[in-house]
């Protein structure tokens, strides 16, 4: 155990399955005691191991709570960090004791045979490759979050408010937007059972997306938008013709408006507020 002068890493500080910190732990107002670790020791959360709370720190600190601090004279630290993420290690680590608060069993894990190269240069190359992939994944995840925030802002600003004018629009457009009911710009159609159909190359879609392919289509030439009738009702997506939809998925065909524009409108709508059920979320054509 260590003193409380070093930054402490707790479960809540780690992004599960990503091996990154979600805050600056040096700014914590309260320092706690824990297990001391050196830079590039490997931290593995043994409590509820399925949460995948692992970390490869480049600083000195203390692991607060149920962590293993792993290091080896035979293995490169980066290789160990990669190894704990393998399916074999995860399978053994999750053979845990306890039902409400399961913990990995070190006796079981430590007695499991793992293969590794004796050449440390090979270990180092493998570990470095995986670390670089982690960095790239983290970068893309941050870019994805930024794009999601940008899209959310544009959905608010590029569609007209009660005044009939959007706050943000392309140059060359200034006229007031018209107001219409959905029934005036698109048709809402019900999906059907597909089990009587033969196998083919026409995709069948449900609320969760693609299911299988059949030999007939409900819409042969017109693209549309799928929106759940039951279950997942808040996740519209574009359907490319030809397609078939099951009876839990409406398909909407626009006829007086651009498909992608209508899809943008669908993404602005909080469909859950139109849920008319007391159990499984449900929509009707009248919604």
Image (cartoon, rainbow, N blue to C red):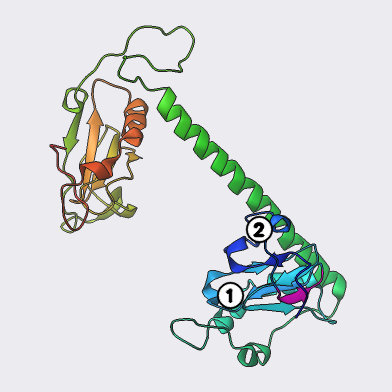
The residue that mark 1 highlights is: 87
Q: Please give the name of the residue rendered at 23% of the width and 40% of the height, measured from the top-left corner.
A: 251
Residue 92: x, y in percent? 57, 84
Q: Quadrant of the N terminus?
A: bottom right
User: Of all residues shown, which one is farthest toward the left?
Assistant: 286
Residue 243 appears anywhere in the view: no
- In the picture, measured across the screen, residue 182 lies left or right of residue 24, that is left
Image coordinates for residue 275, horizontal then vertical, percent: 20, 46
Q: Which mark is residue 201?
A: none
User: Does residue 233 show up magenta in the picture?
Assistant: no
- Residue at image location 56% in from the left, 43% down from the top: 144
Which one is nearer the viewer's eye here, 264 or 275? 275
Q: Report how far apart the C-alphas of labels 1 and 2 lie in the structure.
A: 23 Å
As displayed, is residue 107 above or below residue 281? below
Q: Is residue 280 above or below residue 79?
A: above
Give the quarter of the image for residue 75: bottom right
SS for callout 2: strand
Q: Magenta segment, which residues?
A: 33-38
Q: Is residue 216 left or right of residue 71?
A: left
Q: Please tell me which residue lies in front, 263 or 62.
A: 62
Drawn side of residue 182 relative to residue 12, left or right? left
Residue under pointer 2: 21
Q: Position of residue 189 (x, y in %)?
A: 17, 38
Mark 1 secondary-structure assignment = helix
Q: Is residue 245 left or right of residue 284?
A: right
What residue occupies the far front of the structure in this picture?
29
């Amino acid at each position: 155990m260590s003193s409380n002068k070093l930054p402490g890493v707790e479960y809540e500080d780690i992004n599960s399955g990503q091996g990154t910190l979600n805050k600056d732990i040096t700014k914590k107002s309260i320092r706690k005691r824990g297990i001391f670790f050196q830079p590039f020791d490997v931290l593995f959360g043994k409590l509820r191991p399925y949460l995948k709370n692992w970390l490869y720190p480049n600083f000195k600190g203390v692991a607060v709570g149920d962590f293993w601090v792993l290091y080896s004279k035979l293995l490169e630290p980066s290789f160990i960090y990669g190894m704990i993420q393998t399916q074999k290690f995860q399978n053994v680590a999750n053979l845990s004791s306890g039902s409400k608060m399961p913990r990995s069993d070190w006796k079981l894990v430590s007695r499991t045979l793992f293969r590794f190269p004796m050449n440390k240069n090979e270990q180092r190359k493998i570990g470095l490759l995986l670390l670089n992939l982690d960095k790239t994944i983290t970068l893309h995840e941050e870019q994805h979050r930024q794009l999601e925030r940008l899209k959310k802002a544009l959905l608010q600003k590029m569609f007209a408010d009660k005044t009939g004018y959007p706050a943000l629009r392309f140059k060359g457009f200034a006229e007031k937007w018209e107001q219409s009911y959905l029934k005036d710009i698109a048709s809402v159609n019900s999906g059907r059972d597909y089990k009587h159909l033969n196998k083919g190359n026409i995709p069948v879609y449900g609320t969760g997306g693609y299911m299988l392919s059949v030999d007939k289509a409900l819409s042969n030439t017109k693209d549309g938008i799928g929106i759940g009738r039951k279950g997942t009702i808040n996740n519209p997506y574009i359907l490319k013709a030809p397609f078939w939809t099951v009876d839990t998925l409406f398909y909407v065909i626009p006829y007086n408006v651009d498909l992608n524009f209508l899809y943008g409108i669908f993404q602005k709508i909080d469909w859950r507020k139109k849920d008319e059920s007391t159990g499984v979320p449900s929509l009707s054509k009248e919604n």
